[in-house]
Image (tube, rainbow, N blue to C red):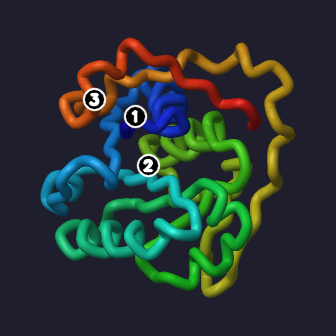
Amino acid sequence: MESVPLNLAYLGAVLKNNGFFVRGYNLNVEPFRAADFAQYDLIGVSVVTATFPKALKFIAEVKKINPDVFTVVGGPHPTSCPEDCLSHPVVDAVLVQEAEYPLLNLVRTLSGGQKDLRAVPNLVYRSGGSIIRNPVRPPLTNLDELPFPDKEIFDTSFYDSNQKAFGDIIASR
C-alpha cells in the first residue's frame, strides 16, 4: 500500500503554515502531465539515487514548457552528491540535509524577487560557472518545532481509502 510521502508532507506543512500555496505530488502514484506543473514558480523534488533519473525527466519536461521555473532537488541522493545533481542543467539548486526551514528561506527569497541566494542555508547552486555551497544550518534539536505533516496537500484519491486507519512513523532523522 502506497502512502502519502511524509517527508514532503512535512515540507509542505512548513510552507503552507507560512502562507505559501503548496501542491504535493507523488510521481510513483499520480499520473504526470508537465503542463500541470509549468504554472508554478518553484518545483522541489525529493529523490533517492534510484529515482533521480525519473526526477530529471520530470523536471526537463516541465522546463520545456516553462524554462523559468526554479527547480530544486533534495533528499538522500542530492545530499550525498550535490555537484553531480547540478551537472544536469535542468536542476537549478540542491538542498542538502534537513530542508524544512531552508526551503522556506529559499521560497521567501525567490518570492520576494531576490536572486541572491547566499543567505539560504543548506543550498548548493551554480553562479557564474561556479558551484556555491552555502553554510549548513545545524540540525533541529527539537523536532516539535515542526508542524504536523500536511497530507491534504496531496490528492488523496490516489491512495488507499483505508490509509486513515494507519499511522506513519519516521524512526530516524
Residue 62 at x, y = what percent? 25, 66
**Residue matched to label 2:** 113
Mark 1 or mark 2: whose residue is earlier in sequence: 1
**Residue matched to label 1:** 3
Is residue 47 in view from this perspective? Answer: yes
Quadrant in the picture for the C terminus: top right
**Numbered disc in front, either 1 or 2:** 1
Residue 21 at x, y = what percent? 33, 31
Query: What amino acid is at disc 1?
Result: Ser
Q: Nearer the viewer, residue 30 or 22?
A: 30
Is residue 18 in view from this perspective? Answer: no
**Residue matched to label 3:** 160
Q: CA distance from mark 3 to mark 1?
A: 7 Å
**Residue 44, disc:** none
Q: CA distance from mark 1 to mark 2?
A: 35 Å
Residue at screen point 58% across, 17% down:
147
59 is higher (above) or lower (below) than 158: below
Residue at screen point 68% across, 83% down:
130
Q: Nearer the viewer, residue 164 or 59?
A: 164
Q: Nearer the viewer, residue 19 or 145?
A: 145
138 is higher (above) or lower (below) than 19: below
The kind of secondary structure element at disc 1 is: loop
Residue at screen point 70% across, 16% down:
145
Crowdedness of circle 2 by 10 Å Cα count: few (<14), some, many (20+)? few
Crowdedness of circle 3 by 10 Å Cα count: few (<14), some, many (20+)? few
- Pointers 3 and 1 in contact (CB under 8 A)? yes
107 is higher (above) or lower (below) than 151: below
Residue 170 at x, y = what percent? 65, 30
Query: What amino acid is at disc 2?
Result: Gly
